[in-house]
Amino acid sequence: MDWPALSLSLRLGVLSVLALLPIGIVLGRLLAWRHFLIKPLIEAALALPLVLPPTVLGFYLLSAFGGGSSFGRAYESLFGHTLVFNFHGLLVASMVANIPFAVQPMQRAFASIPPEVREAAACSGLSSWQTLWKIDIPLAWPGIVTALVLIFAHTLGEFGVVLMVGGNIPGETKTIAISIYDKVQAFDDHAAGIMSGVLLGLSLLMLAVIFAVSNRVGRRYD
């Protein structure tokens, strides 16, 4: 077992969840209730990581984060390094790759809240912030939990984007998915099998959580 790679993957998954939680809530709530001209275009752009090959997405991120781009040069002038081949770049790339898993479940959850409930909150004098904490999040929590679990599980298994943006630097950007690839290349099937089994178990656990949440919500509305 490559424990440093597993630890890095878990850290990346937790930080991706924490970073995308507020972004998913804001964007999901906005897209659920607001209607504007370019809304379909924004929804399509947010869903692109679902259909783009990970290597293609990784190539674009590598080009955007590198020192040859305006963004890369601006970031380097501020922080002294670019976003490629380090953990910070890996985290930003993970956020981009996982944004559809954050936004879409939350958007559907917020959209399922009856308009009458929000109108009653407004008539009761609740501000938008109070409505979010006292009405929206308590009613939309199954979608929020589903989004967070999907982000974490997808981050653990991500390979193409991680390899393109982060490379394969032990202790810095080498995740467990890349470690499995290395073991297979080295014909170490035993180690690859153990790590693959760990990822399989974690993924199964994550999906079980999602189905448990869905079943509990389904029974509530029976």
Image: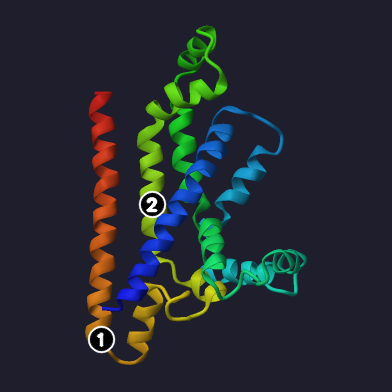
* Residue occupying image coordinates x 68% and y 73%: 66
Image mark for residue 150: 2
The numbered mark, 1 or 2, whose residue comes first in the sequence reads 2
Q: Position of residue 159 (x, y in %)?
A: 45, 71
Give the amino acid type for the residue marked by disc 2 in the picture. Leu
* Residue occupying image coordinates x 38% and y 51%: 150
- The reply to whether residue 217 is in sight is yes
Marks 1 and 2: CB-CB under 8 Å? no
Instruction: Reply above or below: 88 against 121.
Output: below
Given residues 202 and 92, the one toward you in this image is: 92
Given residues 43 and 90, the one toward you in this image is: 90
Q: Which quadrant would the N terminus be assigned to in this image? A: bottom left
Give the amino acid type for the residue marked by disc 1 in the picture. Asp
Secondary structure at badge 1 equals helix
Q: Residue furthest bottom?
A: 186
Image mark for residue 164: none
* Residue occupying image coordinates x 58% and y 33%: 30
User: How does the figure colour the protein chain or chains?
Assistant: rainbow
Given residues 42 and 118, the one toward you in this image is: 118
Q: Position of residue 70 (x, y in %)?
A: 77, 66
Q: Which residue is mark 1?
A: 189
Alpha-carbon span between mark 1 and mark 2? 28 Å
Q: Position of residue 170 (x, y in %)?
A: 43, 81
> Dot 2: within a 10 Å radius of its alpha carbon, few (fewer than 14), some, or many (20 or more) residues?
many
